[in-house]
Image (spheres, coloured by chain):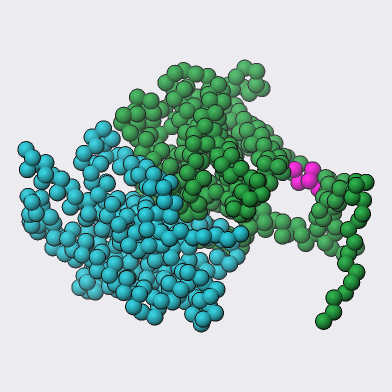
Amino acid sequence: MFANSFELFIQRTVDGLAAGSIYALLALALVVVFRGSGQLNFAQGEMGMFCAFVASTLTLSGLPLWLSILLSMVVGFVMGVGIERVVIRPLEHKNPGGVLVAAIGLFLLINQLAVAVWGVDPRGLASLFPDGEDDFFRLFGAAVRWERVGIFLVMLVLLALLWALFTKTKIGLAMRAVANNQDSSRLVGIRVGWILAIGWGVSGAIGALGAALLAPQAGLSQALMLGPFVFASAAAILGGLDSPLGAVVGGLAIGLIQAYIVGYVNFLGGGMVLSVVFAIILVVLLVRPSGLFGSQRVERV
Amino acid sequence: MAWPKDVRRGSAWHRVGQLVLFGLVALFFIRAGLTWNRSGIGQLTDMLLFATAAVGLNLLVGVTGQISLGHSAFFGLGAYTSAVLVGQYGWTPGWTFPVSIVLCFAVGMVVGLPALRLKGVYLALVSIALATTFTQLLNWDRLAWLTGGPIGIKGLSYLPPSWTPFDGRADLGKWFFWMSLVVFVICTLIASSMIRSRFGRSMVAVRDNETAAAVMGVNLAAVKTLVFGLSAAMAGIAGSIFAMKLTLVEPVVQFFTLFGSIFLLVMVVLGGAGSTWGPLVGAFIFVYVRDWASGVGEGNGVLGLFEGTRIGGLGGIVFGVLLIVIVFVAPFGAVGLLRKARAKVVRVLPRPPALPTVANAQEPQPPTTVVSG
């Protein structure tokens, strides 16, 4: 009996971490944009969804899967840079409140563009990792699917890459400088505009990767990112909007909370998961208003 | 005399101008209420109800600077309060309205508490939580005895009482229209006189700089929670009437979901955040542009996708592009654009300062010394 419930616990933990990895990936995309420009990109999920459709089309035309996903990440990068330069930047100077509305406009635009280009018939996107019926190994009796392990590893590799980007490269240094103080950065010769645009591009590429990893299990449709985006932004807020590590911790935590609630709290039922997640986040935020790992900013009057 | 002409605020000409503008808007609504056909009036009524909720949201977002993406929850709470009292307990619809106002006010004040700690995007995200949690609560099977669960509550009706000039079922559309118009006007009057009051000044101070406001003696906690409550109450009464007009409530009604919150915020920003006329203009643009855009393409509703039908088309693209274009063309909303146009014709000067009292009769003199070097 004990072994059984222990197995179940491990199984739920593994499932939670797997779902959490996706949230963490998407939260990372949000964090990269927020660090630079202080904006929450509401169109992030739809950009990723669009790129997943691009990847699906490329594989259908005969390209290998890994190359298609890589190309779709390039599309995501270009999209991010383009949106920042064409829509967000000009607005930020003219109409800060309008950025939110513009992002909602982009959300609708990209979503419906995907409908117009690819139609509403369901599509598939193959998985990068073996995801057949029996592609799993046993850990303490729980089935761990290779696909989930793959996604988890991709997420860790991405976190390491981002860490290297921010701390080991010149562009990363410039990005941190811009996040800290735009005016001073400009004075020391950093091209702030391009650094912000690159931040959006990187975020677009990460979003594309996240969507490409999510699509095989969730099914590729225009609604692909609606739910995950809410969870991802919750993860980013929980971890602190300017901390990549926080995004990963927040994402995994939310994945786990979700799995445990569905598994153990029968009273609530599956439909109330998001509410409980948000209640927990609210409590965390009331204690730490900038999230778990977010930096507190001192304001001067 | 060259254009633009100068008009002093509070002068006779200024009053005349205001009256003409007000008269034209009033005339439009009165004419619409008397002559428009059933579907036209229905749409105008919806617009007024969204505008009423937007008036409340504008107080919060535009004037006090607290972003909320949770107002669909208050709109829905008002709707469900009326629906439950009418559908489950057989109340007269009119008597449920005060109940939903009070309930939404109370819940709004409680929801305003996190705003004491959280700012900007963090507050926006927590308010998203409110919107999604509300939808989940409506669907929750343990509350189904009250809310009807996913099925909702159907068969609501609010026939005009006998003391009104409306003729029962035939005039149902007009009855709802005039009721919504009155509620909208009352809410706008409350909002605009509030903005001009001492309390309104502290709201603006909170928006512009919280720390400075607190230093100047503004009670942040009182301002934020009260505005949250008031704002929620306005959304609530709009929701109550909306539910009676719709004759049903169910969790998938768009304005009870997160998208409703987003749309209300879009209305506030489109119209011009912080201005008195903004919510009306924003709601007007939103309802009619969306309607027009959904006619483009294959005639599918722009937002069909969001109602789970997964049908879309050109309409959504047009609407998305229009939203972006409008924020570009009108940085301060449509009202800001109108003000700019007006500035070409008349320039409104501020009121003259109050007459000096004996104690400080000395007129401030312009500096006469010229600093050189």
The hue in which chain A appears in the rendered picture of the protein: cyan
- Of residues A10 and A100, the one drawn nearer to the viewer in this rendering: A10
Horizontally, residue B30 falls left or right of residue A287, namely right
- Magenta stretch encompasses residue B20: yes
Chain identifier for the green-coloured part of the image: B
- Of residues B193 and A227, the one drawn nearer to the viewer in this rendering: B193
Magenta segment boundaries in residue numbering: B17-22
Horizontally, residue B249 falls left or right of residue B337, namely left
Horizontally, residue A159 falls left or right of residue B304, namely left
Q: Main secondary structure of the magenta part?
A: helix
Q: Residue at x 32, y 55 (%)?
A: A250
Q: Residue at x 88, y 64 (%)?
A: B366
Q: Is residue B249 above or below residue B205?
A: above
Question: In the picture, residue B55 is in which quadrant?
Answer: top right
- Magenta stretch encompasses residue A243: no
Quadrant position of the N terminus of chain B in the picture: bottom right
